[in-house]
Amino acid sequence: MTKQIDDTQQGKIKQAQSNLEQREDMLGKGYRTIRDNPKTSAAIGAGVVAAAAGGAFLLNRKGKIGTATGHASTNDEIANEVSEMNEDAVSKLNQKEIKSGSVAY
């Protein structure tokens, strides 16, 4: 069941809307933008809600997602691992004396 709005409440609502329409600050401009573009405003609102839900999901799962909680390797560790892998690849190439370049068919 919906409540009926009496005349005094209706007058207060109209007064607040009129006040917002006349304001030149950010609140008034935001009100007019939402009023003039309801579909766009609804789409933006849905996007904000979806982003918040995604953030809440990730925070809820942070124990299972290592990189989201800061358990990833540091830059120095990654750089050391990459340089070791490069050195291993170069040493294997030198041992097998594999020639790189174009292949003739």
Image: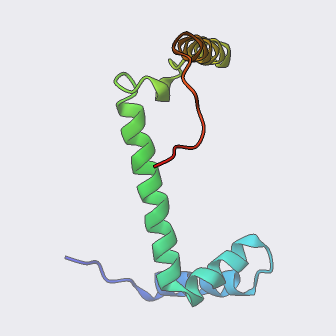
Q: Position of residue 90 (x, y in %)?
A: 61, 16
Q: Position of residue 8 (x, y in %)?
A: 49, 84
Residue 62 or residue 83, whichever sits in front: 83
Q: How is the image coloured?
A: rainbow
Q: Is residue 8 visible?
A: no
Tag count in the figure? 0
The residue shown at (38%, 83%) is 5
Toward the left, the furthest residue is: 1
Toward the right, the furthest residue is: 24
The residue shown at (75%, 71%) is 26
Residue 45 or residue 72, whichever sits in front: 72
Q: Is residue 95 visible?
A: yes
Residue 24 or residue 93, whichever sits in front: 93
Q: Position of residue 29 (x, y in %)?
A: 72, 79
Q: Quadrant of the N terminus?
A: bottom left
Toward the front, the furthest residue is: 105
| Vertical arrangement, residue 68 with respect to residue 78, above or below | below
Question: In the displayed structure, does residue 75 sit left or right of residue 6?
Answer: right
The residue shown at (40%, 37%) is 58
| Vertical arrangement, residue 79 with respect to residue 36, above or below | above
The part of the image, by quadrant, that contains residue 86 is top right
Residue 84 or residue 79, whichever sits in front: 84
The residue shown at (58%, 27%) is 99
The part of the image, by quadrant, that contains residue 17 is bottom right
Q: Position of residue 28 (x, y in %)?
A: 71, 78
